[in-house]
Image: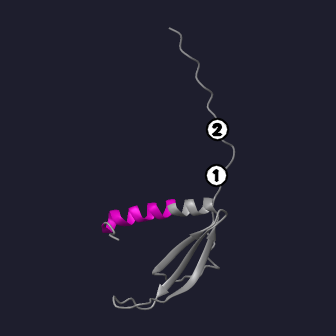
């Protein structure tokens, strides 16, 4: 019986890239409403807040505060990250019912 030769071990000499999150310019906004719009080239996520929500209202005013414009690849990565974050949230606190 012939033993096949071992494959050579490849070691990388390229160091891993380190990502540094610079939050010095970051702003925080609260949103309890969001909407998504899109074209072929971009996906827009609109964020805002409604001031009051009552069952008998004929009109609800949503004050939009932020618009995030993403290319489709970044939008898909965001979708994946949100799914992962919500799975972790629900595993800790229970399923969210919509």
Query: Marks 2 and 1, how far apart in space?
Result: 12 Å
Is the image coloured rainbow, by chain, by secondary structure, or in one colour?
A: one colour
Q: Position of residue 13 (x, y in %)?
A: 69, 43
Q: Which residue is mark 1?
A: 16
Disc number for residue 96: none
The residue depicted at 56 percent of the width and 16 percent of the height is: 4
Q: Position of residue 59 (x, y in %)?
A: 44, 90
Dominant secondary structure of the residues highlighted in magenta in the image: helix
Instruction: Name, please, the residue furthest toward the top.
Output: 1
Left or right: residue 13 versus residue 54 is: right
**Magenta-span inclusion, residue 39:** no
Assess whether mark 1 and mark 2 are in contact (beta carbons under 8 angstroms).
Answer: no
Q: Which residues are magenta?
A: 80-94
**Magenta-span inclusion, residue 85:** yes
Left or right: residue 74 versus residue 91 is: right
Q: Which corner quadrant of the image does residue 19 belong to?
A: bottom right
Sequence order check: which comes first, mark 2 or mark 1?
2
What is the tally of numbered marks visible in this picture? 2
């Amino acid at each position: 019986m012939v033993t096949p030769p071992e494959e050579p071990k490849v070691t990388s000499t390229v160091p891993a890239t380190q990502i540094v999150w610079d939050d010095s310019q970051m702003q925080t906004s609260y949103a309890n409403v969001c909407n998504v719009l899109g074209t072929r080239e971009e996906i827009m996520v609109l964020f805002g807040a409604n001031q009051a929500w009552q069952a008998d209202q004929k009109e609800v005013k949503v004050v939009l505060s932020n618009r995030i414009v993403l290319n489709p690849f970044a939008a898909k990565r965001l979708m994946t990250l949100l799914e992962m974050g919500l799975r972790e949230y629900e595993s800790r606190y229970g399923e969210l019912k919509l």
